[in-house]
C-alpha cells in the first residue's frame, strides 16, 4: 500500500509540537510518509520555529526528515509575537536547547511546498498549523498548487459565530497574516472555478478545535505510559500552555488545536464538514482577520472551502487526543 505523503507547515508552538510528534508516530507506523516540514514565523520568530521543529524532531528520533525555513513574517504587516501564549522561545517551560547538529533543508519553505507537490501530483496532503504566509508564497510560485495537492487541511479561523481568540472575530493563525490566508482562499476559488474536481481545503476553526482540551491529568497519563525525553519536554511545554489558558480565564488546561487538526487530516472520513465560500476580511477596523463564510451561496461564488464542525468518533475531540497520546507513546 502506498503511504500518503504529508507536508506539515507549522510554527512550533506548543500544540504544534504535539502535531509534529503525532505525525512522526504515524510516519513511523507506516501510515503516512511525512515528506517534510515547513516552518513559518508565527507563535515565535522564524529562527525559533525552525530551531524548535528541529529539536522536536530530534526528540522524536526523526532527525532525517527535511525541515525548511518558510516565510519570516506576514505579507503586509509587522509580525506580532505572542510570548505570553507559547513562552519566549515557543516551547513553554521545556528547555529544548540546541539539541540538533544537522542542517536545514537548503530550499525555502515555499519551494519545498511546490517541489513536494510536484513530486507527488494529486498525492500530497498539506497540513497548516501556523499562519498561511509560506503557503501563500508557494501558491504565488506555483499557481497550479491547488490542483497538484490531494488535500489541504488548515488550522485557521473561526466559523458559525464562534468567538475569536485574538479579536472578538479572529483566530490567531489568520489574524497574524490575514492577507496570506485570503490569498489561499482566492487561489482555491480560482482553481475550483476552472476545475471543480480540485478538492476544497478543510478549514478547522476554533468552533471545533477549542473542543480539544488537554488537561494536567492527560499529561500525567502520558508520562505514566511513556516517560521519555520527548514526553517530558512535551509535558513541560504544556505546563506553560495551562498557565496561559488559566491567565485568560479558561482554567488550568490547554486547547490543543494543532494535533486535532493533524489527526483530522489523516482521518478524512471522520470529519463532519460543510461546503462554503470563505474569504478573510483584510480591511475592517473591527473585523480584520475575520473568516467570513458564505454558507448560503449569497455571493454566488464557487465553494472554496469545507468548514469542519465535528468529529465522527465516539468521545469526540477527547477521543482524538487519546489517539494522539497513544501514538506519541510509541515514540522514543
Ligand atoms: C492557533 O494559534 C496558535 O497559537 C496555535 O498553535 C494554533 O495553531 C490557535 O489559534
Ligand atoms: Ca500553531
Image (tube, rainbow, N blue to C red):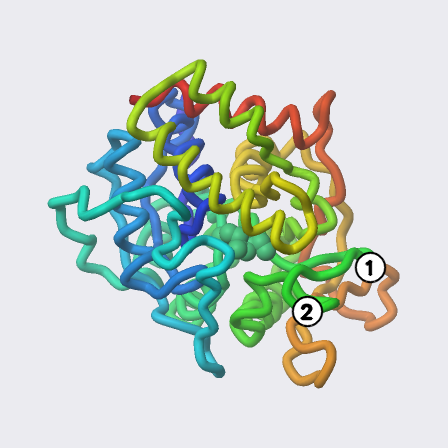
The C terminus, quarter of image: top left
Quarter of the image holding residue 312?
Answer: top right
Q: Is residue 140 above or below residue 23?
A: below
Residue 295 in picture, x, y percent from top left: 83, 59
Q: Nearer the viewer, residue 307 or 130?
A: 130
| Circle number at residue 167 | 2
Q: Residues within 10 Å of mark 1 (few under 14, many from 20)?
A: few
Is 106 on the left or on the right of 1, as rendered?
Answer: left
Q: Earlier in the sequence, mark 1 or mark 2?
A: 1
Residue 5 in picture, x, y percent from top left: 39, 38
Q: Residues within 10 Å of mark 2 (few under 14, many from 20)?
A: some
Q: Is mark 1 within 8 Å of ligand 1?
A: no
Nearest to the eye among marks 1 and 2: give it: 2
Residue at horizontal 18 percent and vertical 58 percent from the top: 106
Residue at horizontal 57 percent and vertical 24 percent from the top: 217
Q: Is residue 152 above or below residue 164?
A: above
Residue 296 in picture, x, y percent from top left: 88, 61
Is 181 on the left or on the right of 91, as rendered?
Answer: right
Q: Residue furthest left?
A: 101
Residue 288 in picture, x, y percent from top left: 67, 77
Compute the Cα span from label 1 to label 2.
13 Å
Q: Is residue 282 above or below residue 196?
A: below
| Circle number at residue 61 | none
Kindly state the secondary structure of the residue where label 1 is placed: loop
Amino acid at each position: 500500500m502506498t503511504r500518503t505523503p504529508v507536508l506539515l507547515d507549522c510554527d512550533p508552538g506548543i500544540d504544534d509540537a504535539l502535531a509534529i510528534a503525532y505525525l512522526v508516530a504515524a510516519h513511523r507506523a507506516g501510515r503516512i510518509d511525512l515528506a517534510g516540514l515547513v516552518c513559518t514565523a508565527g507563535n515565535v520568530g522564524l529562527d525559533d520555529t525552525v530551531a524548535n521543529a528541529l529539536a522536536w524532531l530530534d526528540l522524536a528520533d526523526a532527525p532525517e526528515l527535511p525541515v525548511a525555513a518558510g516565510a519570516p513574517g506576514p505579507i503586509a504587516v509587522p509580525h506580532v509575537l505572542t510570548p505570553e501564549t507559547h513562552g519566549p522561545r515557543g516551547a513553554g517551560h521545556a528547555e529544548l536547547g540546541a539539541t540538533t547538529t544537522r542542517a536545514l533543508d537548503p530550499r525555502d519553505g515555499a519551494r519545498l511546498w511546490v517541489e513536494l507537490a510536484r513530486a507527488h501530483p494529486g498525492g500530497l496532503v498539506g497540513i497548516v498549523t501556523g499562519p498561511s504566509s509560506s503557503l501563500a508564497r508557494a501558491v504565488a510560485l506555483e499557481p497550479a498548487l491547488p490542483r497538484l495537492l490531494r488535500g489541504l487541511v488548515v488550522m485557521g479561523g473561526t466559523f458559525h459565530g464562534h468567538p475569536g481568540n485574538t479579536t472578538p472575530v479572529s483566530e490567531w493563525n489568520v489574524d497574524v497574516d490575514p492577507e496570506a490566508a485570503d490569498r489561499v482562499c482566492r487561489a482555491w476559488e480560482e482553481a475550483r472555478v476552472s476545475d471543480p474536481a480540485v478538492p476544497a481545503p478543510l478549514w478547522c476553526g476554533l468552533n471545533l478545535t477549542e473542543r480539544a482540551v488537554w488537561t494536567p491529568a492527560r499529561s500525567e497519563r502520558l508520562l505514566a505510559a511513556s516517560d521519555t525525553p520527548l514526553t517530558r519536554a512535551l509535558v513541560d511545554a504544556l505546563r506553560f500552555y495551562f498557565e496561559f489558558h488559566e491567565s485568560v480565564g479558561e482554567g488550568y488546561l490547554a486547547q490543543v488545536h494543532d494535533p486535532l487538526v493533524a489527526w483530522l487530516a489523516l482521518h478524512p472520513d471522520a470529519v463532519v464538514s460543510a461546503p462554503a465560500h470563505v474569504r478573510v476580511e483584510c480591511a475592517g477596523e473591527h473585523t480584520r482577520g475575520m473568516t467570513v463564510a458564505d454558507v448560503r451561496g449569497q455571493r454566488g461564488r464557487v465553494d472554496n472551502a469545507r468548514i469542519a464542525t465535528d468529529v465522527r468518533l465516539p468521545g469526540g475531540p477527547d477521543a482524538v487526543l487519546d489517539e494522539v497520546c497513544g501514538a506519541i507513546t510509541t515514540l522514543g
